[in-house]
Image: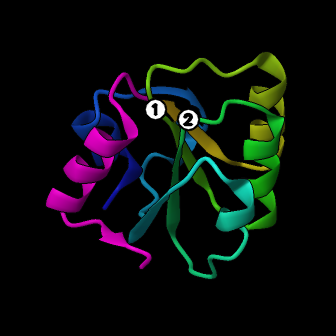
Amino acid sequence: MKILDIVDLIKGTVVSGSDNLEKTVDMAFASDLMSDVLTVKTDNLLLLTGLVNIQAIRTAEMADISCVVFVRNKKVTEEMIRIARENKITIIQSPYSMFKVSGILFSAGIKPVF
């Protein structure tokens, strides 16, 4: 599914990486534990998290995750945006809970990792 379609489904706001909206993701992983994220080995992965700090972006960078959705209307910092831009990571903010975003994306055909 294209990132642009995901943004529409979850009523998201693109904060960084608007030039990557035509990229596709196949699977999603929802976690606030970045150590769990680092154990996932799959391509075209979307990360859903409520953890709004620099570690979330650094984890996405290390795990080759090109799109991160911050749930519960959490706001990212300028430093997070700067690092995301440097690493071509798209950042999306959604007003919905992690549970709701997960359900919406699952219903739309995004597969879970496990």
Task: Label 1, secondary structure: give it.
Answer: loop
Residue 108 is at least partly visible in this image? no
**Label 1 vs 2, first from the N-terminus:** 2
Whether residues under marks 1 and 2 lie with C-beta atoms below 8 angstroms apart, the answer is yes
Q: What stretch is highlighted in magenta?
A: 94-114
Amino acid type for the residue under numbered disc 1? Val
Task: Label 2, secondary structure: give it.
Answer: loop
Image position, residue 104 (x, y; %): 21, 48
Residue 71: assigned label:
1
Relative to 32, does residue 42 appear above or below in the rendering? below
Which quadrant, please, contains the C terminus?
bottom left
Amino acid type for the residue under numbered disc 2? Gly
Residue at the image point whose x is 76% and y is 31% from the top: 53
Answer whether residue 96 is magenta in the image.
yes
Which quadrant, please, contains the N terminus?
bottom left
Q: Give the Cα separation between the discs numbered 1 and 2.
A: 5 Å
Q: Name the residue under label 2.
A: 50
Residue 70 is at least partly visible in this image? yes
Give the color scheme: rainbow, by chain, secondary structure or one colour: rainbow
Extreme-left residue of the structure: 107
Please tell me how crowded label 1 is: few (under 14), some (14-19), or many (20+) other residues with Cα within 10 Å: many
The residue closer to the viewer here, 47 or 99, is: 99
Relative to 1, does residue 74 appear above or below in the rendering? above
**Left or right: 102, with 20 as reference point:** left
